[in-house]
Amino acid sequence: MQLNEILKELNSIIDSGRKVPGFNGKMMIDSEKLSEIFRELSNSADAGLNEAQLIITQKESILEQAQLESNRIKEQAENSALEIQESANLTRNERLSDSDIIKEAEETAEKIVQKSHEDAQNIIQDAQRQAFNLISESESRSSDQRDGADRYSREVLSNLEERLSDVLGQVRRGLDTLGSDQNMTGDRSNGNHTIVS
C-alpha cells in the first residue's frame, strides 16, 4: 500500500470514530484497524529501505563488472605485447643486422599496452557515470515522492485538525448545556477500541 493510501485509510478510521461523552473531546476508534495501519506504515518503510539497498547493489555491480573488464583488457594487452617482444627477440637472434624489425616490434608492443590502458580507463569512467546517473535518478524520484507525500500529509492533517476542532467545540457546547455540576457518563466499552485525543 502506498503512503497516500495509508493516510487515506487513517483519515477514514478517524472519521468513523465515535465521540466519548465526558472525555474532553476524545474519540473511540477501532484498535485493530489502527494496528493494521501501523503495520502498513512499517512495510512501506521497509520497502523504501529495500529499494535503496537494491540501488547500492546495482552501483557496486556496475563498478565491479567494469573493473573486471578493465583487468581483462590490460591482461590481454600485456600478453599480446609480451608475445610481440618474444617474437622480436627470436627475429633479432635470427637476423641481428635487421634492427628496424626489432624497433617496429617494440613500438607496436608499446602502442598496444598504451591503447589497452586507455580502453580500460574509459570503461571505468563509463561505469562510474552509469552508477552516478543511477543514483541521481533514484534520488530525484525519491525526492518527488517525498514532496508529494508531504503535501498530501499536510492537507490530510489540516483537515483532521479542523474536524477534531469541530468535534471538540460540540462537546464543549454540550457540557455547557448540561451544566458544570452534572456528571456525564458514556459508553466506555473496552472491546476492540482505543480512546484517542
Image (cartoon, rainbow, N blue to C red):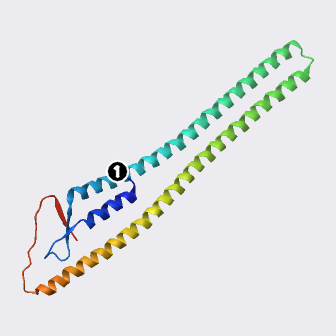
Query: Front-most of 116 and 3?
Result: 3
Residue of label 1: 43
Number of residues whose C-alpha sits closer than 10 Å to that of mark 1, classed few (under 14), some (14–19) or many (20 or more):
some
Query: Front-most of 16 and 181?
Result: 16
Where is residue 150 drawn, in percent x and y?
A: 43, 65
Horizontal arrangement in the rendering, residue 21 relative to residue 94 (left or right) = left
- Total marks placed: 1
Residue drawn at (45%, 47%) of the image: 51
Q: Quadrant of the C terminus?
A: bottom left
From this view, report whether residue 80 is shown above or below residue 8.
Answer: above
Horizontal arrangement in the rendering, residue 19 relative to residue 149 (left or right) = left
Query: Front-most of 123 and 22?
Result: 22
Horizontal arrangement in the rendering, residue 166 relative to residue 142 (left or right) = left
Residue drawn at (10%, 72%) of the image: 186
The amino acid pointed to by label 1 is: Asn
Residue drawn at (15%, 75%) of the image: 23
* Mark 1: secondary structure: helix
From this view, report whether residue 15 is shown above or below residue 44.
Answer: below
